[in-house]
Structures are given as C-alpha cells and as structure tokens.
Image (cartoon, rainbow, N blue to C red):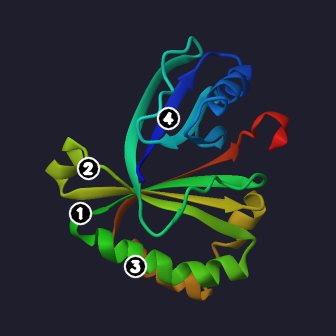
Amino acid sequence: MEYDYFQLTLGRERTAQRALADRLYAAPRVRAVFAPLLGFASNAALVLVEAGADVGGAADVAAGAHDRLTPTLRPTADVEPAPGGIYVHNWFTIDGEAAEEFVRLSGEAWPDFEARFETSIYGLFLAQASEADRREGARRLLLMTRYRDLGEWQVSRDPTSEAMKVFLRRRELTRVSLARACVLMPRAGGV
C-alpha cells in the first residue's frame, strides 16, 4: 500500500481545518487529517490518504504540495492513527544508500522507546525520490510518532535510554531532520 501525504495551505480562518477534515473524512481512503501545533503555519493542514485519493479542488485549499510515501516497518496494515495526544511529523533527509540501515536502526530502537515513554510510532515512510533527491544522492523519510503531549516528547529526548543510543547511530546517516508537531483532527462525532 502506498500513501500520499499532502501539506496544504488553507484559507485564513482556523475553521477551514475543521471543514476540510469533515469533507475529507466523508470520502473513502482518507487515513488522517492533522492541524498544526508547532512548526507549521497556522493555516496549514496535513493529510494522509491512500495513494491516488483526491483531496484537491476545494475552495478551502489555497495551495499544496504532496509526497508519495511507501511504509517501511509501520504501518503494517490498513490502520489509522490513534486519537489524542500530539503527533510529531519528522522529515529525515539521509544519505541515499543508507535507507535500509536507517529503517533497521529505527525498528531496533522502537521497542525500548515505546516501553519507556508514553508514545507510539504510527509509521515510518520512505518518500518517492524527487529529482533533487536523485541529484543530491539523498533519500527522505517521514516518521509519524504520537506522544501523550509535548512534555512527553521532551522527556523522550533522554540520551541515556537504549533507544536514544540507537537513534544516535541513526543520526550519523542523517543530513537533516525537521520535526514539527500537530494534532489529529477527529472524525465527526469524535470517532
């Protein structure tokens, strides 16, 4: 299964995110709609859909960009993100030949990370290589992680944990990472 991840710019009103979420959740193949918390523009929305699902064409979408994503270790099935807490969307740009090792190290660290902190890894996705990625010999991955709150994210930075020791090895493969926080927009009725 492949996914499309959209980073949309909406109209000025914050209610545009709720309207967009309601419209998209009514359509099939929409996995999640996220609203910004930290690091995203206040009029942004992030949308994860099954590949090929339509999210455009609405008056509430002023602009957008998208990436085609292939899940690596997670999600392993047709699973939607769990409600509550915050989600950190962390984009990694890594050395192109290091993707397999990056994924392996991630999977090695997750059991300790999830056992130690109130967090869960929703997915680690490999983005389809862009022309710039190919030219620069890079690959991009998107990691979506749910935390209880921003405090739990901060606590999880503990450099003494076994997970962090593995993540430090993963960092050696990383050119750039960009982590931003958002919240999952619930489906109508809170489901």
In the picture as drawn, the residue positioned furthest to the front comes out as 28
Which of pointers 1 and 2 indicates the residue nearer the eye?
2
The residue that mark 3 highlights is 104
The answer to whether the residue labelled 4 contacts the one labelled 3, judged by CB atoms less than 8 Å apart, is no
Instruction: Give the amino acid at mark 2.
Output: Ala
Residue at which label 4 appears: 7
* Distance between mark 1 and mark 3 Cα atoms: 15 Å
Q: Is residue 178 left or right of residue 25?
A: left
- The front one of 162 and 145 is 145
What secondary structure is found at the residue carrying circle 3? Answer: helix
- Please tell me the numbered disc located at residue 129: 2
Query: Earlier along the polypeptide chain: callout 4 or callout 3?
Result: 4
Instruction: Sort mark 4 into few (<14), some (14-19) or many (20+) by Cα contacts within 10 Å.
Output: some
Q: Earlier in the sequence, mark 4 or mark 1?
A: 4
**Residue 39, image x, y percentages:** 59, 43
* Disc nearer the start of the sequence (1/2): 1
Residue identifier under label 1? 96
Residue 177, picture quadrant: bottom left
- Judged from this view, the residue extending furthest toward the left is 135
Horizontal side of 30 relative to 26 (left or right) equals: left
* Mark 1 or 3, closer to the camera: 3
Q: Is residue 159 among the parts visible in the rendering? A: no
Residue sitting at 71 percent across and 53 percent down?
Answer: 86
Query: Do tag 1 and tag 3 residues touch (Cβ < 8 Å)?
Result: no
Q: Mark 1: which amino acid? A: Gly
